[in-house]
Amino acid sequence: MKRKDFIKQATLVSTSFFIARDLLAKDNGPVFGHGGRRYKMDMKWSSANPALNPVNDCHEMVQDRKGRILLLTNETRNNVLVYQKSGKLVGAWGHEFPGAHGLTLTNENGTDFLFITDTAKHQVYKTTIDGKIVKTVSAPLEAGVYKKAEEFVPTETAVDTNGDFFIADGYGAQYITHYDKDGKLKNCFGGRGEGDEHLDNAHGITIDRRLHTPTLLITDRTRNCFKRFSMDGKLLEIIKLPGACVCRPVIKGDHLYAAVLRSPSLASADSGFVTILDKENKVVSNIGGTQPVYKDGVLQPMSQSEKIFRNPHDVCVDDDENLYVAQWASGKVYPYKFTRV
């Protein structure tokens, strides 16, 4: 074969490949996100029957050491639904958490436990993976910042490797309380206020181990940012996310994921998306949101661009880096799955 004929044929084959690939992608539905973090959406991932296993608000999700996906809802007919990654429902439990909100997984010597926050009961519960309550934490009146238990409205927890745990009072007085493994109060910081060291809607908290020294990442949702604190409560950094009322930070590998409940610049309350940041705190992808744009190193305001969510509240990243998104006040829909492409 002559060289020019070979090149022509190779070009045709290559062109045909890319056309076929694009057509296949279109046949399988749209792709959401940007850069190297792009996903296909499955709105019918859950196999649960609403008549048997209903949800109300879908609040948070985690993956346990068996690979199962656990969903927390404030529906007391079954506060926790347990799924396989395929979406098959394999278990359900919990009737005692009317204000079920935060769900955190921790592992103790090979055994999984859960921390559940209840905004209606003003308490935090540690349970076994199948729902047996082993510890209850009530309002920390001993901290001297609460006059009554009702002022404590916990939304999230984070657990350290030594068993110490932190509670974010995201719907209450906005304090972060630090306890030892036995539940003894060690520290209290944050609180509502105007300075950077204070918080407003401290909705989520996690321990970030991507750097040499562990730190706390805490949501300041009203101010559209995450704040990094030292483990003893000193403010270290503010990660600004203009246009994003972020929920809890979720770390998987080098990336940070967060559901964005809504964009304050838009009139609609149903204006959320999912945002993904790299290790340098740069937004690299928005699922259902505008493409992240930086001008002179400053992130420009983001907003919803595709109406695929109504008030997304949490994102769970599985061991294959697929995503599951739980939504609040969204017509009692089950979580959506996003498969990475």
Image: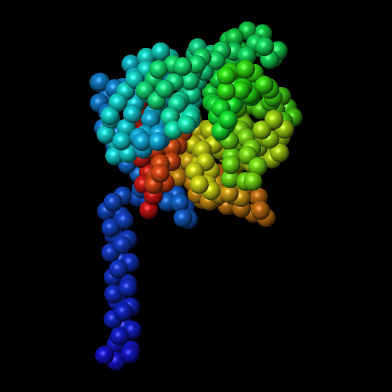
Percent x, y of residue 313: 47, 31
Percent x, y of residue 172: 60, 18
Report the side of 319 relative to 265 (left or right). Answer: left
Number of numbered tags placed on the structure image: 0
Percent x, y of residue 176: 64, 24
Percent x, y of residue 73: 40, 23
Q: Decide: is 172 above or below 252.
A: above
Which residue is more in the foreground, 266 or 322? Answer: 322
Which residue is more in the foreground, 254 or 305? Answer: 254
**Which residue is outermost to the bottom?**
2
Residue at left offset 40%, top offset 41%: 318
Specify the quadrant of the image occupied by residue 76: top left
The quadrant of the picture occupied by the N terminus is bottom left
Residue at left offset 53%, top offset 33%: 248
Specify the quadrant of the image occupied by residue 12: bottom left
Specify the quadrant of the image occupied by residue 46: top left
Residue 140 is at least partly visible in this image: yes
